[in-house]
Image (cartoon, helix red, strand yellow):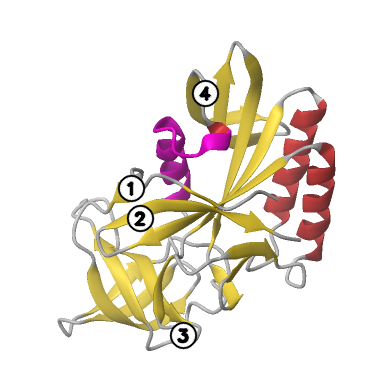
Amino acid sequence: MQCSSHIPTLMAMLFPSPLLRGTLIQRYKRFLADVKLDTGETVTATCPNTGSMKGLTAPGSVVWLSTSDSPTRKYRHTWEMIENDLGAGPTLVGINTGHPNKIVSEAIGAGGIKPLVGYASLKREQKYGKNSRIDILLEDEARPTCYVEIKNVHLMRKAGLAEFPDSVTERGAKHLGELADMVREGKRAVMVFLIQRSDAKSMKLARDIDPTYGEAFDAAVAAGVEVIAVRCKLSETEIVIDKLVKVGE
């Protein structure tokens, strides 16, 4: 839906401390993962991802954890990335769904996502629609208000082709409907897919996983909702906005 274009590599989210390398033992209860660190210590880490993480939970996989010294946390470690190999060598994949809003917000503020530059103000987590919150609200007196919804993408079943979603998401379909409503009210609405893996050359919907989301997506695009997919590069120290990639059907 748009031509691929490089983004100046200025927008980076730095991890607060060096990540720890380890081997995944298991993910369980959705929010927990047992990991054997390279030091030999076995720890339980928080898994900040509510999705299925299809293809990214194989025991024995190399994973990377961040650490926190907060006294209020039950688990000190957080699962950040996993190495995934689809035949072309291992690629770091970001699984923390808490990062995309911050990454996209900072990129917009720095002028790094051209379709979303030129607004006077940027606000996060603003109420709108039917008891929902929009990830980013862009406002400017000279143009219509812009509603930006962000989704984290890490599913890849075919080398080079990122997909979304990795599980049924009723909430995601609802958000698409509300974005379409904003367009009908004369506002601008943009769906941003943030791909946390550098091996993505394009992206499409996983319609076999969630046909209803696919239908909601089609209806939203027909109503005038814009779609942007942004690829990231990841390392043990940072996540960097890389380029826009083409979104197919």
The prevailing secondary structure element of the residues shown in magenta is helix
- Seen at 74% across and 51% down, the residue is 173
| Residue 12 tag number | 1
| Residue 239 tag number | 2
- As drawn, 69 above or below 146: below
- Residue type at mark 4: give it: Gly
Separation (CA) of disc 2 from disc 3: 23 Å
Q: Is residue 28 left or right of residue 215?
A: left
Please state the horizontal and vertical placement of residue 50, each as a whole percent of the image.
54, 62
| Residue 58 tag number | 3
Q: Is residue 41 visible?
A: yes
Mark 3 / mark 1, whichever is N-terminal: 1
Please state the horizontal and vertical placement of residue 213, each as a whole percent of the image.
76, 57
| Contact flag, marks 4 and 3 (Cβ < 8 Å) | no
Q: Which residues are magenta?
A: 98-115
| Contact flag, marks 1 and 2 (Cβ < 8 Å) | yes
Q: Secondary structure at mark 1?
A: strand
| Contact flag, marks 3 and 1 (Cβ < 8 Å) | no
According to the picture, the residue beneath numbered tag 4 turns out to be 118
Mark 4 / mark 1, whichever is N-terminal: 1
Separation (CA) of disc 4 from disc 3: 43 Å
